[in-house]
Image (cartoon, helix red, strand yellow):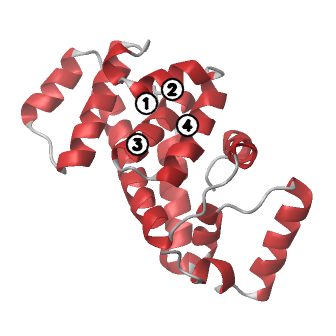
Amino acid sequence: MRLDILNHGYGAGTKLLFALIRLFSRHPVPDAAKLVFYRPDFYGAQAKQFTHEAMRGPSAWSIGDRELMAAYVSKVNESAFCISAHTATASQAYDDSPRVAAVLTDLESAPIEEPLRATLRMLGKLTRDGKLATNDMRDLLAAGASSQQIKDALAVCAAFNTTNRLADTFGFALLSPDDFNAGANYLLKRGYH
């Protein structure tokens, strides 16, 4: 059920901003962007800061790797909007759509490095089960992921488990492939703030 607040819950300044974005970009404002403008003091400002740091802050993981993590967590959560948005962004970041599709189709046979595969496996388990064991971390370290990479991946997981639930609760509208690609281009140029 789509909550109407995403269509009408803004002041005049924000409505004008959305109109200008639509005019100059020739694409609709995604509901993810609309959500952070609704009550920014309560959610939006903090969410943008946390997500930007997780997705674009310093990390041994590339931007493509972190966007792939976001797409993978979204797939485990079956969040259609976020799967599409972050598949498009990861595909552009890597400049390799088949690689991203392979990971989302079959993680175990996808052509990726073992530390990333093991990290995605761990993020999937955490997202599905809501918990991890000590051996999960040992396995991840043995696969070649560093302690800092694990922390960085967990930040991506936290950001997108939250975003996925909000996307589904608010009924984010699915966009066209062109609109998702335009959004991906924006995220790669400007990030999440």
Q: Pointer 2: what residue?
A: 101
Q: Pointer 1: what residue?
A: 104
* Disc 3: CA contacts within 10 A as few (<14), some (14-19) or many (>=20): many
Q: Pointer 3: what residue?
A: 75
> Is 57 left, or right, of 154 in this rendering?
right
Separation of residues labelled 4 and 3 (CA atoms): 10 Å
Q: Earlier in the sequence, mark 1 or mark 4?
A: 4
**Residue 179: in sight, yes or no?**
yes
**Of residues 4 and 29, the one drawn nearer to the viewer in this rendering:** 4
Separation of residues labelled 4 and 2 (CA atoms): 8 Å
Separation of residues labelled 1 and 4 (CA atoms): 9 Å
SS at badge 4: helix
| 2 versus 96 height, above or below | below
Q: Are marks 1 and 3 in contact (CB under 8 Å)?
A: yes
For badge 1, the amino acid type reads Leu
- Which residue extends farthest left? 134
| 126 versus 101 height, above or below | below
Q: Pointer 4: what residue?
A: 87
